[in-house]
Image (cartoon, rainbow, N blue to C red):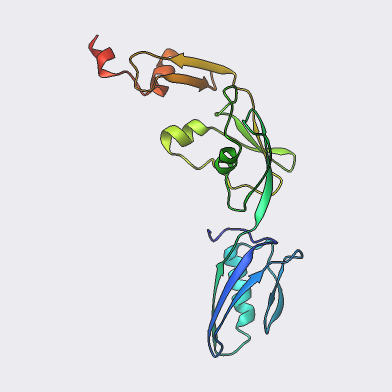
């Protein structure tokens, strides 16, 4: 996981010690957000990033003279999120704590034929946290909008509003969804442009 991963109850912390003491521990974060470190005692870690937690735990372990320590994440906790709206299997899903919106959509079977893939809403704490356009993800490889999920997040797929069918001598004939007013140029560009056959006519 990345260094900015936020540790929470249910996560497992792998601790490797060497030097005066050689030991390996798998410490699970309890409901109170603590790990019980042998020879040191309980340490509050929930709510800290992996980087912050490593600094705290290593700082405590330095009280044991002549010991080196390495910290990493073991098994990660699962969280519950809601996937609702125009998806094939709406409901509550248990996903990894590092899962993103695209992961949860995959578990739910993805949007239905009526569902929007350009205005997918992520709601957090009852408020709109962000809107995701999967065209950027699928056509440009841009994953910056594919945010990491938090417990009780709601992913809502509304109905698509404006859709245009593009067929004939284009590279990607399909039905395309538009956010703004559709134009012929935009439709052709979404379809990958004209084929050589169309250009030669």
Left or right of residue 33: residue 74:
left
Foreground of the two, 192 or 86: 86
Q: How many numbered discs sit on the rendered protein? A: 0
Q: Is residue 181 visible?
A: no
22 lies above or below 120: below
Q: Position of residue 100 (x, y in %)?
A: 57, 45
Query: Residue drawn 28% across and 13% down?
Result: 198
Foreground of the two, 92 or 98: 92
Query: Residue drawn 60% across and 76% down?
Result: 25
Q: Is residue 51 visible?
A: yes
Q: Position of residue 199 (x, y in %)?
A: 26, 14
Q: Quadrant of residue 197?
A: top left
Query: Residue drawn 52% across and 21% down?
Result: 178
75 lies above or below 179: below
Q: Position of residue 72 (x, y in %)?
A: 55, 68
Q: Quadrant of the C terminus?
A: top left
Foreground of the two, 188 or 22: 22
86 lies above or below 152: above
Q: Position of residue 80 (x, y in %)?
A: 69, 48
Determine the residue located farthest toward the right in the rendered image. Answer: 32
Determine the residue located farthest toward the top in the rendered image. Answer: 201
């Amino acid at each position: 996981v990345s260094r900015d991963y936020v540790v929470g109850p249910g996560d497992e912390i792998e601790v490797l010690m060497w030097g005066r003491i050689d030991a390996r521990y798998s410490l699970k974060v309890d409901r109170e957000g603590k790990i019980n470190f042998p020879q040191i005692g309980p340490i509050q870690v929930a709510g800290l990033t992996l980087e912050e937690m490593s600094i705290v735990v290593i700082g405590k372990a330095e009280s044991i003279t002549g010991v080196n320590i390495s910290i990493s994440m073991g098994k990660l906790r699962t969280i519950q999120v809601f996937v609702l709206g125009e998806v094939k299997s709406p409901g509550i899903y248990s996903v990894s704590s590092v899962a993103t919106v695209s992961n949860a959509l995959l578990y739910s079977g993805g949007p239905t034929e009526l569902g929007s893939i350009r205005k997918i809403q992520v709601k957090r704490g009852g408020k709109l946290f962000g809107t995701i356009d999967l065209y950027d993800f699928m056509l440009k490889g841009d994953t910056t909008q594919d945010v990491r999920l938090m417990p009780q997040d709601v992913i809502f797929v509304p109905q698509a509003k404006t859709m245009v069918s593009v067929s004939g001598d284009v590279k990607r004939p399909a039905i395309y969804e538009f956010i703004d007013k559709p134009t012929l140029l935009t439709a052709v560009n979404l379809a990958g442009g004209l084929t050589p056959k169309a250009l030669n006519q």
